[in-house]
Amino acid sequence: MKKQKGAVVRMRDCRILREGRIIKEDLWIRNGHIIDPEVLFFEERRSADISVDCLFLIAPGFIDIQINGGFGVDFSSCTEDSIEEAIALVRKRLVAYGVTAFCPTIITSSPALYHQLLPHIKRSEGGLHGAEILGIHLEGPFISKDKKGAHRLELVRQDLDGGMSELEETYGSLKETAIITIAPELRGCMEAIRYLSQRGIVVSLGHSGADIVLAQEAVRNGARCMTHLFNAMPPFHHRDPGMIGLIAQAKAAPALGQGCLKALASDLTSASAAQEDVVYFGLIADGVHTHTASLKIAYRAHPKGAILVTDAISAMGMPVGRHNLAGVEIEVTGDTAHIAGTNTLCGSVATMDRCVRSFLTATQCSLVEALEVASLHPAQLLGLDRRKGTLAFGADADFVVLDQDLEVLATFIAGQCVWRRDEERTRHFVSTL
Amino acid sequence: MTDSLKIIVYKSGSDLENGMHELLKRLAKEAIAARGKFTLGVSGGSMAKQLTAAVPDIYPKGQEEWKKWHVFFCDERIVAFDDKESTYGDYKKNLIAKVPELESQFVVIDPSKDAENNALHYHNQLVQRFGNAMFPIFDLLLTGMGPDGHTCSLFPGHPLLEERRKWVAAITDSPKPPPSRITLTLPVLNHARNVAFIVAGSNKAEAVKKVLEDQEKLPSGMVQPQSNGGKLYWMLDSEAASGLKNTRTHTEL
């Protein structure tokens, strides 16, 4: 029998999150994937080459679908000469917070900037060099000028009258784009939502004043997510719930065209067809952007749709002080970031692991649920849940080792330890191959 | 007429040059104080000689800030730099000869490329310097006007007048030779902080009247930076202004 290459690693004595439960089970890894030890034994009569006593909780690596930068760099402020370095820096530093995959986010910018930057941000596997890049998140410029938040007004577009060619003129190639945040009320945007979702790009509604009727129409046209629920959208009113009311709907009616999650690549298939109908919503659980009560209400209304995002800005991971985000001066004070001199929040400085802990406390959900909103749900939104956001057999071995306080002890990508906390109890998590 | 549009009539060519000196000196000072640099667009024709007279004395000896100037072309002919039609060639022989520090500050075309590729090349150079914006915001664009009312390489009735998105356009059918040029587009002109038309000579008088008094739709009349909060100056000599009867003019900035 042909012996397969690659050492077999067995993480022992740990608890793992699998199929919606935390169970006491070993995690077996080979060639960057999670494997079934029974199949290994019956087919190859093999056991582990390396055993690691884990003793902690292993969860799928966190996935951040909305992150503008961090550690002093802001993607939207880069030029074509600096963007690759910025991405490299952020992806490498993110793993310390349990993030194994992310969507670099570019906020409302000029066509000149999109044409400069987007060709330099490509999907790319993770490893010792850092987290995987799952595709770009384009937040703007087709948003409502009344809900622009910290985006630059002069760059916000009034409409999308030019249709597909205007999208191309604005962004250039959308080949590496995973998500677009768009406001459905702009003229021409509903058609764009349909076109984009048919192309396999996730459409997220946000920075919008749309009411619930329009938001529902957008979902019928293929929109499958809402960008930072509660922020940059009309507030909830009991007779006019606005976009927030979509969480009551939970699922979309069958789409007009093909389901938007029928993405083009063959490995991008959703684990179950039912997932395609779920309407997801991003939540910034940094303890600042959303009141704990709001987090709890939104989560309880539609637990399967919640996705944790950091919406982190350049100041994440940086000390208190002033920073520049796409041409806007930002003031950072501990937990928060405001446009300097105003009360307008402009993205958070919370790290993903902190968001998970805050979310758990705020919603009083189960440990499984708190971990899934940061891993499984974003993977489902992107149609990647066969290989990401899960510890199922065959999935990519991207996982995070957590202690009982949900602090990140070590992060693994493709079965390799890419980061570990410098403590005695993580000494044995050496780079595995 | 409001504060944002000013028509100044100078008695002589040298008075006009003094006016240009004054305007450049003031705007360069403001721009450098506010943003650390001065972005200037220049044109061909008689302007090169006028600027050669107006510019060098802007800084007293030993206090030069030339390296903070960034000089672009409102339009340029796609010819070699030693061709007599090359606007840069003209500036090299005149202004740069007098102020050598400015040579590195000029942003030039690539004579080895054709018009279309030069438009892209020049656009990219603008993007490098003006960054993330819908349109580059120049501190000052200096342009002239032809007897037909054209400005930069934007000619009457030409489709380029409709361009709304591009920053730099190629033109290969210019009615005035040489045929192959690149030009800044109307939106760029209209987003500048300051635009100044420098117009001298009696052969321009009729066009000046058509644009400023009769409000005829000519390319020069479509330059309205005031609509975006910018300022527009028409700096004329008395011959060019001779057709104006009903328009309020000034004698100085």
Image (cartoon, rainbow, N blue to C red):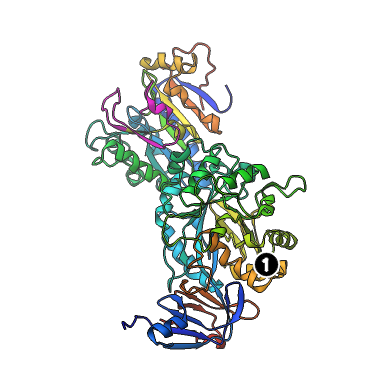
> Residue A426: horizontal and vertical position, in percent?
54, 85
> Residue A193: horizontal and vertical position, in percent?
53, 45
Identify whether B98 is placed above or below A302.
Answer: above
Disc 1 designates what residue?
Answer: A359
- Report helix, strand or loop for mark 1: helix
> Residue B22: horizontal and vertical position, in percent?
47, 33
Which residue appears at 47% of the width and 88% of the height?
A51
Q: Is residue A351 something one can see in this rendering?
A: no
Which residue appears at 45% of the width and 84% of the height?
A9
Identify whether A366 is placed above or below A325.
Answer: below
Q: Is residue B176 magenta?
A: yes
Residue A193 lies left or right of residue A83; in this view the side is right
- Asked where in the image residue A325 lies, by quadrant, the reply is bottom right
Q: Amino acid at mark 1?
A: Phe
Residue A342 lies left or right of residue A66; in this view the side is right
Q: Start and end of the magenta stretch?
A: B153-181
Query: Which secondary structure type mostly characterizes the magenta part of the structure?
Result: loop
Identify whether A129 is placed above or below A69.
Answer: below
Which residue appears at 24% of the width and 35% of the height?
B79
